[in-house]
């Protein structure tokens, strides 16, 4: 604020010169006052220009921020609409896939039930055919042995009433028995047998047809079930894929909605800030223009006053009548004290001087000199003007202080908030990145373990195949050997039994020439190898082959069981690892998406923090205290105003 009267008074005190008249001194002081006023006017212009640049830069930046936020909001709204639309479409597709799976499952269950029922009917009918064919075969053999037609007729009647025969066979037999010529029937036992053989052949043929129909029906069912299983599997896989996609779209939509809320809130804050700052800047601009106008009027008034005082009416008379100023303050004080009409003016000056010393106020000290020097009426006006100016200065500074307090508080809150957010986001990104890397390592390990399981299964399958082929061949060879050895034993036993019978028969006769043969030929012939030796060896061989078959069969069963358990355990372990891999992959996809969103938020938050720091640097020159605090300045100004009012009261009371 301007300090022109103070500077003028101070100049009057310290800048005396020999031979200078009061008028000349006043003109000199006016020149200095004008220079000071011009300097303050230019300084205020420079300060206002800086403030104007701040207003323009900040409002422009906020405008860019609002424009970017508007574009971001439009994009986010479009993304959200697309995500929600995709979620809705995927939901409908999942419903259709679920319906397809339910329909295929129902059709398979219904076909399975029908097939099981048809197979049950087939088994019963097939069993009937088998029993009927067996009964006819037995009956044919019995009829062949029967010589009496009446017995054959009775036997046929018994078979015709048997429930073991199928209905068509019973009907055929009943039709045969209903023929009206028993005599002819009695002579046609051979025809009965032929009739029953034909009936047996027919049943065998019908059984074959029945088996063919069953085979075709089973094949049709197997093809239908396989097709339905493929439909269910394909629909299930597609449903799983769409479910994952739907969850990802839902997560992306939720993230975009969060970004939309943040961006909308940030845009609203920027718009409000820009509006408030525009209003403040416009008000400050109006105030500046008013002050500049007053300062210009002050300069014009000084010029006019100089013109008047420098004219002949004042300066000329002063040169003629007024003595020169004395160079010391003491002489000037004595000159003023000699003027009795200025006693009250001197009292006010003394009071202001003492208050200036007490309050350490240059304003009051310099003004005390001015009060002592100027005319009485002008002094009172000068004090009133100073009170008014200090009051206006206090109001301006209070308004500026309020603006600074509000902006600094808001800026500090913004900086604290954004700093905390950047720290939290950085920590979250670091933590999620570490977790993602761990998931990737775990998935790599799981894939290696699954590959190892596949390799082990493949190797076990190869070993098992070779093992099974070897055991199967061994069992087959053992069975053939057992059958061959058994046949050999049978042949030899039959021979030895015949040889023993023949020897016994020969030993039962009378003594003859054979009695005279050497002793070697006197023994009974039991075979070249001897019954005991060869048969004993064959029994051992047979036992070895039987043991080989049994042990190999047990080994094959044990190997198969062990292999089945290994395959089941491997499949279960592989499925568990596969599910774990899928789970970690889903989590990792979500983590990567969250990291991307967090990095985007961190970038946006850092931009906002940088903007807040930049704005703080702009606020510092005019809002951060440097030297005397605002409270001290307010207190001192208040005491200065009270002192000025007291001085004015001293003048008015005289």
Image (cartoon, grey):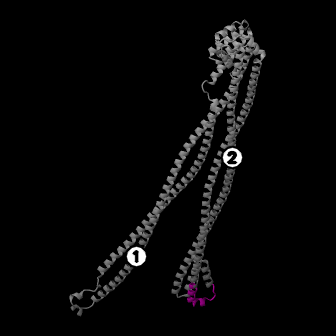
Viewer-closest of 243 and 28: 28
Horizontal and vertical percent for residue 568? 48, 61
Question: Does 100 appear in magenta?
Answer: no
Horizontal and vertical percent for residue 123? 57, 72
Could you say whether the residue bearing mark 2 is in a helix, strand or loop? helix
Q: For mark 1, does the 10 Å Cα neighbourhood hold few (<14), some (14 to 19), or many (20 or more) residues? A: some
Q: Does the magenta stretch mainly form a helix, a strand or a loop?
A: helix
In which quarter of the view is residue 51 placed?
Answer: top right
In which quarter of the view is residue 612 placed?
Answer: top right
Write the residue at 53% across / 50% down. 436
Residue numbers of the magenta segment:
178-197
Q: For mark 2, does the 10 Å Cα neighbourhood hold few (<14), some (14 to 19), or many (20 or more) residues? A: many
Q: Earlier in the sequence, mark 2 or mark 1?
A: 2
In which quarter of the view is residue 640 placed?
Answer: top right
Give the vertical position of 559 relative to 346 (above or below): below
Tag 2 residue: 73
From the image, which quarter does the C terminus lie in? top right
Tag 1 residue: 477
Residue mark closest to the camera, 2 vs 1: 2
Viewer-closest of 410 and 214: 410
Viewer-closest of 375 and 14: 14
292 on left or right of 252 = right
Horizontal and vertical percent for residue 484? 38, 80
Viewer-closest of 609 and 79: 609
Question: Does 184 appear in magenta?
Answer: yes
Residue 128 numbered tag: none
Horizontal and vertical percent for residue 606? 60, 41
């Amino acid at each position: 604020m301007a300090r022109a009267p103070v500077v003028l008074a101070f100049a009057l005190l310290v800048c005396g010169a020999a031979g200078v008249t009061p008028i000349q001194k006043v003109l000199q002081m006016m020149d200095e006052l004008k220079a000071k006023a011009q300097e303050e006017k230019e300084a205020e212009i420079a300060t206002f220009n800086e403030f104007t640049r701040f207003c323009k830069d900040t409002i422009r930046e906020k405008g860019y921020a609002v424009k970017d936020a508007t574009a971001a909001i439009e994009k986010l709204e479009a993304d959200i609409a697309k995500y929600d639309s995709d979620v809705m479409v995927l939901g409908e597709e999942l419903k259709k896939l679920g319906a397809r799976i339910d329909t295929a499952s129902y059709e398979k269950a219904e076909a399975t039930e029908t097939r099981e029922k048809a197979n049950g009917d087939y088994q019963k009918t097939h069993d009937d055919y088998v029993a009927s064919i067996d009964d006819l075969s037995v009956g044919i053999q019995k009829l062949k042995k029967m010589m009496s037609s009446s017995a054959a007729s009775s036997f046929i009647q018994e078979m015709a009433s048997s429930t073991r025969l199928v209905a068509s066979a019973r009907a055929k037999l009943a039709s045969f028995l209903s023929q009206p010529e028993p005599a002819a029937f009695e002579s046609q036992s051979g025809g009965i047998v032929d009739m029953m053989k034909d009936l047996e052949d027919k049943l065998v043929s019908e059984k074959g047809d029945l088996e063919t129909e069953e085979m075709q029906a089973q094949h049709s069912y197997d093809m239908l079930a396989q097709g339905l299983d493929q439909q269910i599997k394909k629909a299930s896989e597609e449903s799983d894929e769409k479910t994952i996609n739907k969850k990802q779209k839902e997560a992306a939509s939720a993230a975009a909605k969060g970004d939309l809320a943040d961006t909308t809130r940030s845009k609203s804050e920027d718009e409000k800030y820009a509006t408030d700052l525009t209003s403040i800047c416009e008000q400050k601009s109006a105030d500046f223009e008013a002050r500049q106008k007053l300062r210009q009027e002050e300069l014009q008034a000084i010029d006019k006053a100089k013109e008047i005082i420098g004219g002949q009416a004042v300066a000329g008379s002063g040169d003629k009548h007024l003595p020169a100023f004395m160079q010391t303050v003491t002489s000037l004080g004595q000159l003023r004290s000699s003027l009795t009409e200025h006693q009250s003016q001197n009292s006010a000056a003394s009071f202001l001087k003492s208050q200036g010393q007490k309050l350490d106020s240059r304003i009051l000290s310099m003004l005390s000199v001015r009060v002592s020097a100027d005319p009485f009426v002008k002094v009172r006006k000068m004090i009133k003007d100073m009170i008014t100016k200090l009051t206006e200065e206090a109001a301006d500074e209070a308004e500026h202080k309020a603006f600074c307090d509000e902006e600094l508080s808001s800026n500090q809150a913004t900086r604290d908030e954004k700093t905390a957010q950047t720290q939290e986001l950085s920590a979250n990104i670091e933590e999620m990145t570490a977790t993602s890397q761990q998931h990737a390592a775990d998935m790599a390990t799981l894939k290696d373990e699954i590959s190892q399981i596949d390799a082990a299964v493949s190797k076990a399958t190869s070993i098992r195949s070779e093992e099974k082929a070897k055991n199967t061949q061994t069992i087959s060879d053992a069975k053939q050997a057992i059958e061959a050895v058994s046949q050999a034993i049978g042949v030899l036993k039959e021979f030895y039994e015949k040889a023993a019978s023949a020897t016994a028969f020969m030993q039962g006769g009378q003594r003859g020439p054979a009695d005279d043969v050497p002793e070697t030929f006197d023994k009974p012939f039991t075979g070249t190898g001897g019954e005991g030796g060869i048969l004993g060896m064959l029994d051992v061989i047979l036992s070895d082959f039987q043991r080989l078959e049994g042990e190999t069969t047990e080994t094959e069963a044990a190997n198969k069981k062990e292999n089945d358990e290994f395959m089941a355990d491997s499949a279960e372990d592989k499925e568990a690892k596969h599910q774990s891999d899928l789970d970690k992959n889903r989590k990792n996809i979500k983590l990567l998406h969250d990291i991307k969103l967090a990095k985007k938020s961190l970038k946006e938050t850092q931009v906002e923090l940088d903007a807040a720091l930049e704005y703080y640097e702009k606020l510092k020159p005019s809002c951060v205290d440097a030297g005397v605090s605002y409270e001290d300045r307010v207190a001192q100004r208040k005491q200065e105003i009270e002192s000025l009012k007291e001085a004015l009261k001293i003048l008015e009371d005289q």
